[in-house]
Amino acid sequence: MHDLVHDLAQSISPIRQQQNVFDGVELWHSLFLNSGSFINKAMDFKGLRVLKFGGADIKSLPDSIGKLKHLRYFDISKTKIERLSKSITQLYLLETLRLLRCFELEQLPGGMKNLVNLRHLYISDVRHVPVEVGCLTSLQTLQLFKVGVESGRGIVELGLLVELRGELVIDGLENVRDKEEARGARLLEKKKLHKLTYK
């Protein structure tokens, strides 16, 4: 275990982890990695609350990411990840997910609506808006939304997100069928939104 900790420490920049000791075992709460060399080993730290790969040169994550049941904050911004394992939808306590500038990531896996505790979703690509985003009723931060014609992509999904705040850009308004459907977004009721942009 000590060799594992030493190897991981070499890839952490900077080393800013919180830890507790339980029966002589260190339980790391935060891990910041700038390399993909130790991704699989990082999955062994089951008590992680914060995991940040931001900027790391990685293209994939192991399916075992879903075993980090205590994870609250997950950041893979500026990586080259091409797909996310469906097991990420098992991170039921996740509150913040950062996917900024993930240009290689085509789309999110199905089942993202299971992340019912998600409060902040930081994205810079409309491809990363989850299907049935309206199920994420705790969501406060959603920077982008694209209206689609597929089930779970309609503008009415926004109507269920009563906690939205900050800024929101809505794209694809040509896919709104009529005024009644537009009213379903309940945008006038979202008093905490201070900037709304239509594209």
Image: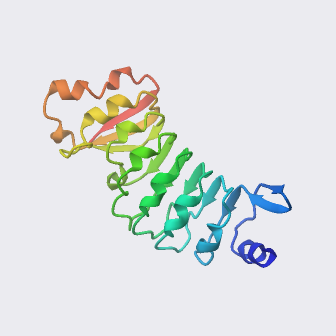
Whether residue 70 is situated above or below residue 3 in the rendered picture: above
State the image quarter where residue 4 is shown.
bottom right
Left or right: residue 34 versus residue 144 is right
Left or right: residue 55 versus residue 199 is right
> Which quarter shows the C terminus?
top left
Image coordinates for residue 45, horizontal then vertical, percent: 68, 63
Name the residue located 80 percent from the left edge and 61 percent from the top edge: 26
Name the residue located 24 percent from the left edge and 39 percent from the top edge: 154
Left or right: residue 147 versus residue 40 is left
Name the foreground residue: 116 vs 178.
116
Name the residue located 46 percent from the left edge and 29 percent from the top edge: 163
State the image quarter where residue 155 is shown.
top left
Whether residue 154 is situated above or below residue 25 in the rendered picture: above
Q: Residue furthest right?
A: 24
Image coordinates for residue 178, horizontal then vertical, percent: 13, 29
Whether residue 14 is situated above or below residue 71 in the rendered picture: below
